[in-house]
Image (cartoon, grey):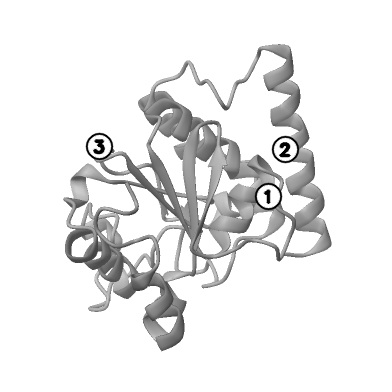
Amino acid sequence: MSNEAAELARELRAKLELYSSSGIDECLISKRSLGEIKAEIEGCTKCDLSESRTSVGTVAGTGSSGLFIVVDRPFAPFDSENRPESESTDAYTGQEGEFLKEIITKGLRLAVDDVCLSFVTRCSSPDVPDSASTPIEVAACLPYLLEEVSVLRPKVLLLFGSAAEAVLGATVGVLPGAVSRNRHYDYNGIKVVATYSLKEILTDKVKKGEFWNGPFRQGKIL
């Protein structure tokens, strides 16, 4: 994470602490419904991504299992057969989306619909680079994620890849580069688990082994 990203994370954390100490807590204790949050996200113009987006990622799944998964940004707008995302309502598109489905159903033995999936940043288009979100994008979008979490109150937040630094930096003050993968943190009474990106788990045998032998085995994460 760059110095700019670290500064934005510190500013957001200071804002959250101010809300908490003043009793406002607009992110930690949301009074809005998921539908109201979704409507604002779909109309958001806080950063340049809104100018080229073809779709917007909002929270998917009921969350009845208690597990809330966060990745950096929505999966590729086109799946492996190059079909437009608009032809499917499935949030788990592309190779990484399908792999995440396997983690949920085969690894954790949970139904996909019973797990929440959301994103640090929301806009998706063929023009959006396949890289971590910028600090400006994170600063614009992260409050939406924290508000979704406050509405659903999951037992566990599972953060993949750069989503871990974005969320932990803003909520529990973990310094850039200091996020420990496959360990537990606490955020407002919610267990938070940070792990590698889906791409790293797919392509790196060592990290794949650490993931499956860590706290993600059935019966350990929840």
Q: Residue at x 73, y 60 (%)?
A: 176
- For label 2, the SS is helix
Left or right? Give the position of 164 relative to 173: left
- The type of residue carrying mark 2 is Arg
Can residue 174 be seen here? Answer: yes
Task: Look at mark 1 in the image and give the residue it sits on.
Answer: 169
Of the pair 173 and 98, the residue shown nearer to us: 173
Q: Residue at x 83, y 61 (%)?
A: 3
Q: Residue 205: x and y, percent?
A: 40, 87
Left or right? Give the position of 153 relative to 40: left
Against 30, is 54 above or below?
below
Left or right? Give the position of 116 relative to 126: left
Task: Look at mark 3 in the image and give the residue it sits on.
Answer: 62
Q: Quadrant of the N terminus?
A: bottom right
Q: Residue at x 34, y 52 (%)?
A: 221
Q: Residue 113: x and y, percent?
A: 19, 46
Against 172, is 206 above or below?
below
Against 173, is 153 above or below?
above
- The type of residue carrying mark 3 is Thr
| Mark 1 in CB contact with mark 2 (< 8 angstroms) | yes
Task: Look at mark 2 in the image and give the residue it sits on.
Answer: 13
